[in-house]
Amino acid sequence: MGFDIDFKGVNNLAKQIGELGDYALKQAVDNAFTASKEYLNKEISGLMEQSIYNFNRGQGYSQGKSKASFEVVSKMPVVWSGNTAEAFIGVRLRDALEFQFIIWGTPHMAADFRLHNAVKVKGNYAKEVSRIQQEQFNKVIKEALNNG
């Protein structure tokens, strides 16, 4: 699962950073995505540990695929394709189908909405990601202005 930068004033910040040069803009986005990804993956890991649905291999119905997939995804770097950046959080659903049932629920099992909101970057998680990204953008602007 990926996420996008989404906070008020992003156009103004991007414009300010754009005036500093392409390197500064790429550095700002990379820093913002990396910091957001680290925060979200830490939260998701904690929620997986607290979940009533065991993610550990051999406990309950779990085969440990979600946890294994999470470990792989959490180590993935920010990926650039031209001018587009992607940061991955959570699990690869094709590797861990059980995760999808847990975050969305089934007719016989309630959804884990805290985990759902963390993976979908909703609610308080969206606010915190917005704060983290804005902080990273401001840091790059301040560094560039001090050095330039």
Image (tube, rainbow, N blue to C red):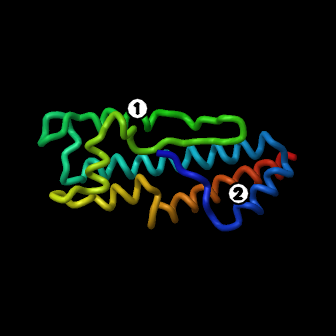
Mark 1 and mark 2: Cα distance apart in space: 30 Å
- Residue wearing tag 2: 138
Q: Is residue 126 above or below residue 74?
A: below
Residue shown at the point (75%, 59%) measured from the top left = 13
The answer to whether 11 appears left or right of 53 in the picture is right
Q: How many marks?
A: 2
Query: Reading the chain from its start, which is encountered first: label 1 or label 2?
Result: 1
Label 1 is placed on what type of residue?
A: Val
What secondary structure is found at the residue carrying circle 1? helix
Report helix, strand or loop for mark 2: helix
Query: In the image shown, does 103 or 127 lie closer to the viewer?
Result: 103
Could you tell whether 17 is left or right of 59 in the image? right
Task: Please report the residue visible at 58 percent of the width from the left and 46 percent of the height from the top.
Answer: 33
Residue 55 point in image, percent of width and height: 23, 42
Q: Which residue is mark 1?
A: 72
- Labels 1 and 2 touching (C-beta < 8 A): no
Q: Is residue 95 above or below residue 123?
A: above
77 on left or right of 110? right
